[in-house]
Image (cartoon, coloured by chain):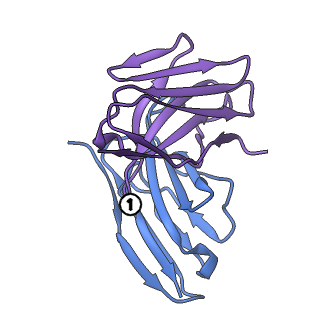
Amino acid sequence: DAEITQSPRHKITETGRQVTLACHQTWNHNNMFWYRQDLGHGLRLIHYSYGVQDTNKGEVSDGYSVSRSNTEDLPLTLESAASSQTSVYFCASSAPGGQDEQFFGPGTRLTVL
Amino acid sequence: RKEVEQDPGPFNVPEGATVAFNCTYSNSASQSFFWYRQDCRKEPKLLMSVYSSGNEDGRFTAQLNRASQYISLLIRDSKLSDSATYLCVVNPITGNQFYFGTGTSLTVIP
């Protein structure tokens, strides 16, 4: 069965360190998204990609970067982790067209000390 | 102004009750609408899409009011298993981005 996975599921890091969160999907979806979820804010879009070599900034992209070298993966990098980036991170994918369901990964809980 | 606004609740209802959630959106040109369900510490999952004419899926009914820019979700005969957070989601005309509401928390009490 097709799926979307994230790793690690939990991560504790220190301020200033670079952190990369992995997202891998086997749906063969062109569209992939990274969100963060915090109390009182809901899901907020960080970055998204509509295909290989395509990346776009979302609502809260400062301090984050992504790259898309193949269809299956969209890693999210925190260049220099800050305590404000402590959150739950969800990756999602969807088929082209914009009208379709987004499928979410199980999430990564990141704590920055 | 937020793209999507929801009443966060919480809604605490007895089993068998009917409960309704509303959600408003700011972009009048928005094209597609969804309700997602999120269980505690889990990922959001699609509950149902919302169509212009309204649609029903078992005990769940979704309605769209474009004139007033709101969507609603009605749950009839609530079950304990309906306890979750319900997210209102809107897809504006531009691009494939979704905008999520902050969610409405529902607890169904035995």
Q: Amino acid at mark 1?
A: Arg
Name the subunit of mark 1.
B
From this viewpoint, is residue A27 visible? Answer: yes
- From the viewer's perspective, tell me whether residue B5 is left or right of residue B33: right
Q: Residue at x 57, y 62 (%)?
A: A39
- Which residue, as the protein is rendered here, is positioned at the far left? A1
Q: Quadrant of the C terminus of chain B?
A: top left
Q: Quadrant of residue A8?
A: bottom left
Q: Residue at x 67, y 28 (%)?
A: B93
Dot 1 lies on which element? loop
Q: Is residue A35 above or below residue B91?
A: below
Q: Residue at x 62, y 59 (%)?
A: A40
- From the viewer's perspective, tell me whether residue B93 is left or right of residue B14: right
- Which residue, as the protein is rendered here, is positioned at the far right? B1
- Residue B47 appears at what percent x and percent y? 40, 33
From this viewpoint, is residue A102 visible? Answer: no
Query: How many C-alpha atoms fall within 10 Å of the one at disc 1: few (<14), some, or many (≥20)?
Result: few
Q: Residue at x 40, y 17 (%)?
A: B56
- Residue A105 appears at what percent x and percent y? 37, 53
Chain B palette colour: purple
- What residue is shown with label 1? B41
Q: Quadrant of residue B58?
A: top left
- Which residue, as the protein is rendered here, is positioned at the far top? B53
Q: Which chain is blue?
A: A
